[in-house]
Amino acid sequence: MSDNFKIRIKGERDIIPIIRFMLMFILFDGILLLLIPFTYKNLFISSICSMILCILSAYIIHKLSEGMGALLSEGASRRTSRDERFSCEINKIKYSKREGRFDQALQLVNGLLDQDTDIPEALLLKAQILWEGHGKADAAGKCLNRIRELTPENDKFHRWAMGYLKKVGAKAEKD
């Protein structure tokens, strides 16, 4: 373990913001005292005004840095795609399917498709679950045809759906 590693005690405070605040206070107070004649009354008034200016400038700096951070990271304008939003659920479905828990996988995929009915990857998984786990070629075919409707011909899910549809159709004809 490194000697530089330090665990902070819960009540311990970071001293840097306090030092920055004090430096800003001294700066504002010094400027105000240079602009107005020195009396104890003016010292008191300039100290109160300096505190208010410090609080306002700290707020402005915070908001500016927050905005710049969002601008630089594109966090404020970036929208998550549908695939990113549902990737966790898709992974759960894939895992359940891979483990042979087809009922659980079907329940998960139906829950996902209740949220958004037009997710090609979820529809493909549902077709695979219906066919491989439950032997329902007709229901699997409906899912695959829906993928064909949703996606362009050059899309990977469209191609996969076409290939799987041929596989399901060929297997169903044998039986």
Image (cartoon, rainbow, N blue to C red):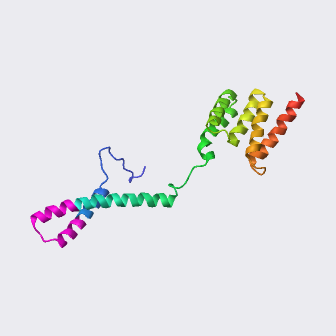
Image point (46%, 59%), residue name: 69
Q: Residue 124: where, in percent of width, then height?
A: 73, 39
Image point (19%, 72%), residue name: 35
Compared across the picture, whether 124 is left or right of 36 comes to right
Query: To which quarter of the image does residue 60 belong?
Result: bottom left
Query: To which quarter of the image does residue 116 belong?
Result: top right
Q: Residue 167: where, in percent of width, then height?
A: 84, 37
Image point (81%, 38%), residue name: 165
Query: To which quarter of the image does residue 103 belong?
Result: top right
Q: Residue 136: where, in percent of width, then height?
A: 78, 28
For the C terminus, the quadrant is top right
Q: Residue 1: where, in percent of width, then height?
A: 43, 49
In the image, residue 139 above or below residue 43: above
In the image, residue 77 above or below residue 117: below
Magenta: main secondary structure: helix
Compared across the picture, whether 36 is left or right of 164 comes to left
Magenta span of residues: 26-49
Compared across the picture, whether 161 is left or right of 35 comes to right
- Furthest toward the left, the residue is 40
- Furthest toward the front, the residue is 149
Of residues 96 and 58, the one nearer the viewer is: 58
In the image, residue 151 above or below residue 28: above
- Furthest toward the right, the residue is 174
Image point (71%, 34%), residue name: 126
174 inside magenta stretch: no
In the image, residue 6 above or below residue 141: below
Number of dots carrying numbers: 0
